[in-house]
Amino acid sequence: MKQTSTRPNIRHLSLSDLQEYVVRAGQPAYRARQLYGWLWQKHALGFEEMSDLPKVFREKLMADFSFPVAKLELLQQSRDGTVKCLFRLSDGKAVEGVLIPAGERLTACVSSQAGCSLGCTFCATGHLGLQRNLMMDEIFDQVAFLNALAMQQAGRRLTNIVFMGMGEPLLNYKQVMQAIEKITDPHALAFSPRRITVSTAGISKMIYRLADDGVRFNLAISLHAATDEKRSQIMPINQSNHLSSLMEALAYFYQLTRNEISIEYILLNHFNDSLDDAKALVKIYRKLPFKVVNLIEYNPVPSSPFSRADSSTTDRFIAYLQQQRVNVRLRRSRGADIDAACGQLANVVHADAALPTSHADVH
Ligand code: SF4
């Protein structure tokens, strides 16, 4: 159900906006910090929760501002412990975020757009097309909820946050940057930027901008094929952002920030899994001080012509990279049974894995 409000969204105000508002409302100046803490640190879901603000002030806030929240509508738990969350946005659109426990790591994978415009042929999200960009508070909500879920399920905070869910983060640049500002703000969620990885399909122009903006988080490049000829077949963005321009942008990023850059590479059966493909990948790897090549097991999606590389081909591919002294890791598919794995996010619900939940249960 579409909700509209003419009142401004309280979470689109900066701290200094809140400070001005508080003074105009005749409240003591320290109320702005209290309010900010409720919004960004305690992740309040409504003004009524802000118990240390006077009732009359809460009523004024309710009259002056809207407070839309991405509502956690459904949890689906995989046999391997991965949990996929469906978030309903205030206009009725849905996005997904995933909690991935793996050893010591508790990783949140979050979405930056509803759908995606880039149309990578192996990806379920790409087949949805772009519905809209997420607002910074809608991105923040996913992280805050997944962090609360981590606390509830494992008794500790997230260790890593990756922007690898639905959408291309660099095509929603401003909102993603603002969300990360709040996720890392010591007066909000206080995560280290070194624990955050933004993954891009390779928008060269925006990689230059990341560098110029001096960001402190890590970057992952979704490579998936190491020649222009092959990459353009599966990632249409490569037609306007060739590998040479992408490498130049990444070199600039590394030169300015020294932040880690990793390569993501989904192994697709008989498409990019041959020894020649591995050789092309080594050439790319040697161009820059990449931290790691993450090889990803593919989970076929109905709309895609591809299947997973078989295990002996995968082993041979890894062995070649290791022999060439590439720092390579195989990322085993996680959450495939609930379509939570890489490239599978398309708001598909598996009734047998759905846990009954209410928004407040993991808050
Ligand atoms: S792989 Fe990423 S960039 Fe490509 S269509 Fe899917 S969500 Fe978009």
Image: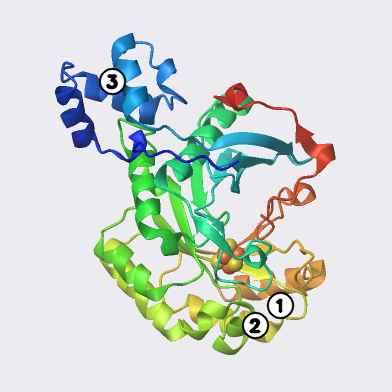
- Any atom of ligand 1 within 8 Å of the CB at mark 3? no
Q: Position of residue 321 (x, y in %)?
A: 61, 73
Does 338 sit above or below residue 81?
below
Residue sitting farthest toward the right: 352
Whether residue 358 is visible here, answered yes or no, is yes
Determine which residue is flagged by label 1. Answer: 273
Determine which residue is flagged by label 2. Answer: 277
Q: Earlier in the sequence, mark 3 or mark 2?
A: 3
**Quarter of the rendered structure image containing ligand 1:** bottom right
Q: Which of the 4 quarters of the picture holds residue 207? A: bottom left
Along the viewing direction, whichever of 216 and 114 lies nearer the viewer: 114
Which residue type carries mark 3? Gln
Q: Position of residue 137 (x, y in %)?
A: 42, 41
Which residue type carries mark 2? Asp
Q: Residue at x 74, y 28 (%)?
A: 356
Residue sitting farthest toward the bottom: 229
Does 189 sit above or below residue 264?
above
Is 171 placed left or right of 1 in the picture?
left
